[in-house]
Amino acid sequence: MFARVAFDLPVPTEFTYAVPERLRASVQLGQRVRVPFRTTTRIGYLVAFEDTSELPRIKDIASILDPDPLLPAELMQLARWISGYYCCSLGEVIQAMLPGGVRKSRPKVRCAVIVEGATIESLSKRAKRAAELWEELQGYRKPPVVARLLAETGISRAALQTLVKAGMVRIEEHDADEQFATATAATGETPPELEPQQSAVLDAIYPDIEAKIFRTHLLLGVTGSGKTEVYLRAIDKTVRDGRQAIVLVPEIALTPQTVRRFRARFDRVAVLHSAQSESERRRAWTRIRRGEADVVIGPRSAIFAPVPHLGLVVVDEEHENSFKQETTPRYHARDVALVRAKAVHCPVLLGSATPSLESYSNALRGRYVLHRLPHRVGKLPMPPVELVDMSGEPGRLFSPRLRVAVQHAIDAGGQVILFLNRRGFATLVLCGRCKHMLSCPHCSSTLVFHKGRRRAACHLCGHETPLPDRCPECHQAALKQVGSGTEKVLEEAERAWPRVTYVRVDSDTARGDQIEEALDQFRNGAARILVGTQMVAKGHHFPNVTLVGIVNADTALHLPDFRANERTFSLIAQVAGRAGRSERGGRVIVQTYNPGHYAVALAAQHDFEKFARAELEERELLGLPPLRRCALLVVSGEDQALAKTQMQRVADSVRRHSNTTLVEVRGPAKAPLERLRGRWRFMVLMLSTSASALAEACAIARGTKVTRKIDLVVDMDPAAAL
Ligand code: ADP
Ligand code: ZN
């Protein structure tokens, strides 16, 4: 009997070991094993069994680490697919699937257990403290953890020892996770009566849930159209049928407000997120694995939640970039969701007001079922969007139209969101005389001035420097600040409307819980004007917002990325969607230098489908996704010349060995971000209508030998071609 073992290493192969007689009864796929490796030992994952092996001199597995497989067979299968499709090793995928805490052994805690039949009679009359502790112990429903018992009662350890000696109490080691396992109960909420447009969608999804049919439903619903209610009902059906649902949400949308909506409906909700400690995550994982959670909510990695009977996957805001992981394994959680759902036969529900063009074109081609929710709930109209051409307002942050609108909104008792997707104060710092720009010593990027910290910072690598008094290049003149970020928006707004309360939300002001605190201040009216970046754009429901001002809609428009138009459209539509969510109504003012650009103009008309069709035509002309699949190869290294020649080698090898009638190879070229964290970067773009031909080309690229000082990244379906 032989076993194949995968390691968390970037090596494409698995290694064969013999299973010694003494371990044969206990080995199972998905366990971790310790094996001899070169001159030492290593821990690896057991991924396959074989009856025979051709290899000479096969070493034995030394020991098994887990009594049970860490991953169920279904997820092992999924891991194999991910490793093949995203071009990485199986061990790397398994490592990424398991939350950190699960890979470690489970901690034990010491608990005080009452010995059956013991009575206080066994205790000496003088042991007063011990008697007290005995009384206290009777009040616990489960044997308490010793440390907790002593802390809560304030009684000494000696008293506990007395009880143990008297044979009344026994100290036992218990699984720490068991101690903390708590079931939450639904807070109870009567679901609203469905609107006809919601019922129509659900009527189409229910049969797939019930009959366990793999099918993808794309819910294209404007902001505030009741998509979440559709998710909740579909999940409810799944749970009533005895299966579990996974809900994927973008990282920044995973707020207490979102979680509350799910907890209000369902008893057994497990939440996974990146801010959790290892033990919290392990606990959640254990519960999920035992089938003790009906609904799992989390960001992209939640697609690996080991629910025993997956009955539905929901992907909210499916167009979001954060579903794509930017480190190995570079998987896209939405696409992994489809593969997993297909394997276990369950439907997938994708929802967005601005779907990715990938999903939308799949729907047009009939691969997904397209459902439209064209109206807001309760007959609320979509807010009117006014475009303001800023080319007539040089150097101004707020146009007269926006100023008047803010004043009106405040006077009428409404709230305002001022949106700019750039943090910091000034986006450029340059010399007034020689025009030298402060730039990052490690990246090909300019530094952004942060007034609060009085420093200039690189937003790519985090490099920071105090602002010099004079130009560091010509030493003649002072530095000028050009361009604006949220810090300046806030400063100018405070100057224009001094008696108003403000809150600023971007990744400089807020992290984790603080974001939610700041948003709460706005939600409860303590702050009247919210200034923020895309953190405020997603999913939030602020009924009192009557004006949204987009200070500059063009921030993404000129990025060297083929999705620049798509990003621009979606950001405008999402931010605009925060306005007019109650009877008070609302309006949106979009400041732009490109009012005629179709991404901007159609976003103002809330016309996603018209935009998508125009953009799809554009992509077709250029041969870009979603009409063809794309893979990006990036070679990087500290030595520019070496990185360049190595990229050329990889490109040559792909051109020589892959099917170039099926795969177009573009490049090598400098990456748009030519230098990042001190490394020079070159890229090759590969495009094909054939997924298998592209995968083959990726494998060839990955198999090309490059020198050790060079990194080669293969990124299948890249989120950004940067
Ligand atoms: P979306 O997810 O499409 O932005 P939501 O599901 O958040 O929209 O719905 C917007 C608001 O409308 C929420 O406050 C929600 O509770 C409410 N809502 C949703 N469906 C209904 C309905 N059928 N009847 C009444 N209110 C509803
Ligand atoms: Zn940098």
Image (cartoon, helix red, strand yellow):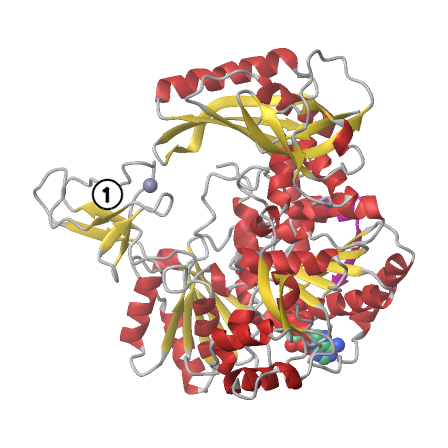
Ligand 1 location (quadrant):
bottom right
Tell which residue pokes out farthest to the left in this image: 476
Look at the image and give the residue range highlighted in magenta. 361-372
Q: Quadrant of residue 679?
A: top left
Q: Is residue 474 above or below residue 57?
A: below
Q: Is residue 557 above or below residue 603?
A: above
Image point (70%, 79%), residue name = 118
- Looking at the image, residue 134 sits to the left or right of residue 30; the answer is left
Q: Is residue 578 among the parts visible in the rendering?
A: no
Query: Who is closer to the viewer here, 530 or 336?
Result: 336
- Looking at the image, residue 192 sits to the left or right of residue 101; the answer is right
Q: Residues within 10 Å of mark 1 (few under 14, many from 20)?
A: many
Q: Is residue 471 among the parts visible in the rendering?
A: yes
Q: Is residue 163 above or below residue 437?
A: below
- Residue 183 in percent (x, y) is at 69, 71
Q: What residue type is disc 1 on?
A: Leu
Q: Quadrant of residue 375?
A: bottom right
- Looking at the image, residue 664 sits to the left or right of residue 363; the answer is left
- Residue 56 in percent (x, y) is at 70, 11
Q: Quadrant of residue 238?
A: bottom right
Q: Which residue is mark 1?
A: 438
Is disc 1 placed on a helix, strand or loop?
Answer: loop
Marks counted in the figure total 1
